[in-house]
Image (cartoon, rainbow, N blue to C red):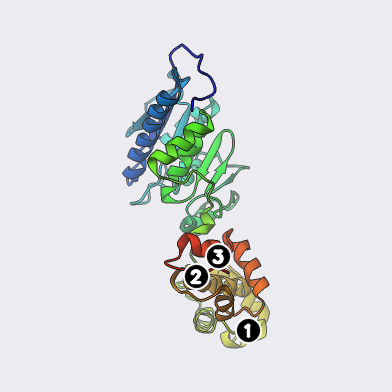
């Protein structure tokens, strides 16, 4: 199937994609993005007699001393950082360059921890962004004024795109290609790479890893109790008694220690256990709901969809080793 315009006869418009590289950068993302855009070029040539665009990827181990005298890239992608804490340290030169490029029309993007650099550059002020769900607490500590949505795998605006998980560079790359080529090219690219071109959400993959090293022993005692008895009905009064605290003190200290209220903490425990059961056992959806403390199956389904974006059956079909229908 040919793309929309077969009459373009001039040379393709060059879309420059710059990838700044910091210490600890995930090289798989750098090389993977190069391969993705190169493959997109090949498919464009196959589907269009005279392609209108061509992607050119430029990994940048070092930034130009002065970017003002050169044309900015069309796209800049700050890749994930897997080792070290370069994303937390002062990156004045990179942030200045990103700010300059953005002011001159570059679409600035990040993957995973790369969002910290966009925030440091001031590009996310007044915007919504995402990063890896495991980095949420750290991001909120450093940038409490920014709107963060770690349920989303991609947060897309015309000039800024942030991607969540480490491997979300795949989703980001497909999205950026789709901005410049017809859907048929993106679909062909997905088929060739054997990757899903449909929309995903990061909350599909989130797991509950509560904070346990906060040092508040009464709260920790209650956490241990909740982990052992998550399927049982727990009132605020009972939880306060377990912790040996008054109700108001419990609510304040529990949120301070874990980032959640005790009721939400209990829901997250139940949700995590439900995911594990759906992924690893053949129990019916009704049995799973009862096992994790829900007598109302409808309430369980609503809770599950609200927090994961999938029905229990969809979660089992996507992640389960085996399963049955609802």
Earlier in the chain: of badge 3 and badge 1, it is 1
- SS at mark 3? helix
Relative to the observer, which residue lies in front, 167 or 109? 167
Q: Residues within 10 Å of mark 2 (few under 14, many from 20)?
A: many
Residue extending furthest front?
Answer: 1
Check contact, mark 1 vs mark 2: CB within 8 A.
Answer: no
Q: Which of the 4 image quadrants contains residue 27?
A: top left
Residue ID for mark 2: 278
Element marked by disc 1: loop
Q: What is the count of numbered marks?
A: 3
Quadrant assignment, res 59: top left
Q: Mark 3 sits on what residue?
A: 313
Which element type, helix, strand or loop, lies under badge 2?
helix
Q: Residue at x 40, y 42 (%)?
A: 79
Residue 59 in view: yes
Q: Residues within 10 Å of mark 1 (few under 14, many from 20)?
A: few
Q: Which mark is residue 233?
A: 1
Q: Residue 121: x and y, percent? A: 50, 39
One can see residue 117 in this view? no
- The residue sitting at 37% across, 51% down in the picture is 85
């Amino acid at each position: 199937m040919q793309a929309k315009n077969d009459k373009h006869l001039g040379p393709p418009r060059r879309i420059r994609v710059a990838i700044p590289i910091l210490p600890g950068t995930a090289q798989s993302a750098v090389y993977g993005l190069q391969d993705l855009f190169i493959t997109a070029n090949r498919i464009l040539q196959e589907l269009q007699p005279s392609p209108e665009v061509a992607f050119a990827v430029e990994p940048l181990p070092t930034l130009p001393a002065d970017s003002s005298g050169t044309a900015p890239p069309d796209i800049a992608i700050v890749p994930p950082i897997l080792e070290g804490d370069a994303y937390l340290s002062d990156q004045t030169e990179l942030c200045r360059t990103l700010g300059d490029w953005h002011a001159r029309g570059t679409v600035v993007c990040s993957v995973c921890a790369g969002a910290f650099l966009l925030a440091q550059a001031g590009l996310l002020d007044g915007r919504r962004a995402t990063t890896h769900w495991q980095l949420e607490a750290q991001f909120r500590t450093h940038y409490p004024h920014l709107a963060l949505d770690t349920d989303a795998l991609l947060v897309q605006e015309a000039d800024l795109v942030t991607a969540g998980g480490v491997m979300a560079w795949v989703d980001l790359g497909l999205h950026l290609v789709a901005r410049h080529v017809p859907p048929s090219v993106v679909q062909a690219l997905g088929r060739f790479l054997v990757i899903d071109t449909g929309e995903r959400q990061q909350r599909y993959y989130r797991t509950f890893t509560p904070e346990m090293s906060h040092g508040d022993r009464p709260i920790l005692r209650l956490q241990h109790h909740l982990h052992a008895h998550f399927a049982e009905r727990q009132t605020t009064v009972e939880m306060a008694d377990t912790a040996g605290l008054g109700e108001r003190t419990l609510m304040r200290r529990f949120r301070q220690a874990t980032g959640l209220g005790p009721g939400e903490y209990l829901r997250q425990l139940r949700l995590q256990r439900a995911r594990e059961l759906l992924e690893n056992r053949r129990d019916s959806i009704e049995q799973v709901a009862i096992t994790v403390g829900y007598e109302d199956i409808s309430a369980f389904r609503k809770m599950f969809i609200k927090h994961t974006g999938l029905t229990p059956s969809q979660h089992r079909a996507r992640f389960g080793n085996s399963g049955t229908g609802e």
